[in-house]
Amino acid sequence: MCGNGLTGLHGDRTNKTSVLRRATKRVKMYKLDLPLDLKEVAAIERRRNREQQRQSRIFNAKVRTIGVDVEVLKCQVAERKLAENKEKAREESFDADRVQSDKVAQILEVEQDCFARSLNKKVQEFREQMQAPDTRREFDLYDPDALKKDKPARVSDDDPRCGPASLQKLGGEDLNKQAREKLQEELTKKWLTEQRQERERLQTQSKYADNLCDKKRVELDERALHLARMEEDCRKAIDLATENFNKAQAAEVAERRRLEKQQEEDDNFAEIYNHLTGDILTENPDQAISWFGPQRVVSDRWKGMSPEQLEAIRHTQELQRQENERLKEQARQLDAEWDKQRNLAARAGMFLEEEECSVRKHLRKGLDSYNQQLAREQKAHLQYLEKEVYTNNPTAQYHCQFNTTSR
């Protein structure tokens, strides 16, 4: 319907133009002096030119722009990737700091556990040696061997505590003396065996715990020594490289100074010779001292500074040079420490990148399987559309009715 409307509008305009042309020809043919509407003719010509320009813009594929601006989208994607990379680098640096802090915390925790175990062991040894239960005042109240230590009502038949009124000593008693003594010996032997076994078991457990603690402490010490040795090797290598570089720099500076000094000495000798052969400096050097004080001299009689003054200046320059070398050495050590931190951060980043690659591969496999399933479903849907839905294909005459005007 829209195409038919545009076609009708264009046909109406074409009819108006043709009528105007025929009227113009008729006026020329019959030479009638009829006035023409110049405004209407100009308006028609202006609409015709605008229509041609519009068609040139719409039907030209190189000028026409359909959709979004791809360049702007690419710039936005690049900016977003840059921001994500910065955030990722920041997170990686934080992760490296957290890993380093966790390692230090683990080492401190192990050291604290060893210290607590050693302290508990010393406290237990002090209690066993200095605070034995039998040294307490109330030990007789809960002594497990109180009955063993207590004297019986009758020790023997000749016990002086057993009088006639005690009913503990009767004539002809103690017939089971041998059995009683044998039973007592067996009980004593049994108690001694149990006590020895208990003591051996406690000693074995204590030795086993001490052995495990010693092994763990030795392992931690070996690990700490290994790390310290590696750090010392790296420091020695850096110090050796720094020392070689410093030696080369010092040799170069010394050679340059020697040449400069030699040149200066040659110039000084030449200047001294020129002055000595002249008529100005042949007088007494004391004449250069000014009347205003020893610190002031007469410029036209002064022969230069004394060796002591020159030595003081050279000494001050040497102190300044040593201070500059010390500052340079501190800066080199600081740069080496920063390089070490950057290497640690780079290693942590490589580890995280490998882990991310493995996760990305796993996700890629899942996405490929899902895409294959979608492709099969789309293929089946296209076959259904081609065979069941789209059975009436349009002809060339159907397509020719479009794109005839710009409206």
Image (tube, helix red, strand yellow):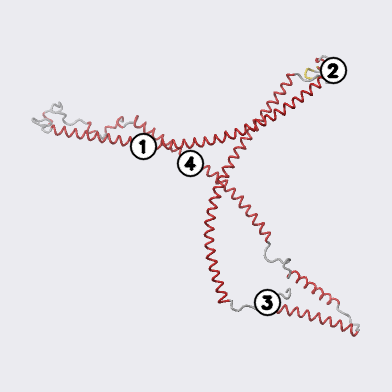
* Residue hosting label 1: 208
* Residue 126 in the figure: left or right of residue 10: left
Earlier sequence position, callout 2 versus callout 3 = 2
* Residue hosting label 3: 399
Amino acid carrying mark 4 in the image? Gln
From the top left corner, tell me how far across and down residue 385 is, in percent.
57, 74
Element under disc 1: helix
Numbered disc in front, either 3 or 4: 3
The residue lying at 67 percent from left, 78 percent from top is 396
Element under disc 2: loop
Q: Using the image as rendered, state which of residue 270 and residue 69 is in the foreground.
A: 270
Element under disc 3: helix
Earlier sequence position, callout 1 versus callout 4 = 4
Earlier sequence position, callout 3 versus callout 4 = 4
* Residue hosting label 2: 277
From the top left corner, tell me how far across and down residue 143 is, in percent.
26, 34
Q: Give the crowd class for mark 3: few <14, some 14-19, many >=20 residues within 10 Å.
A: few
The residue lying at 22 percent from left, 35 percent from top is 190
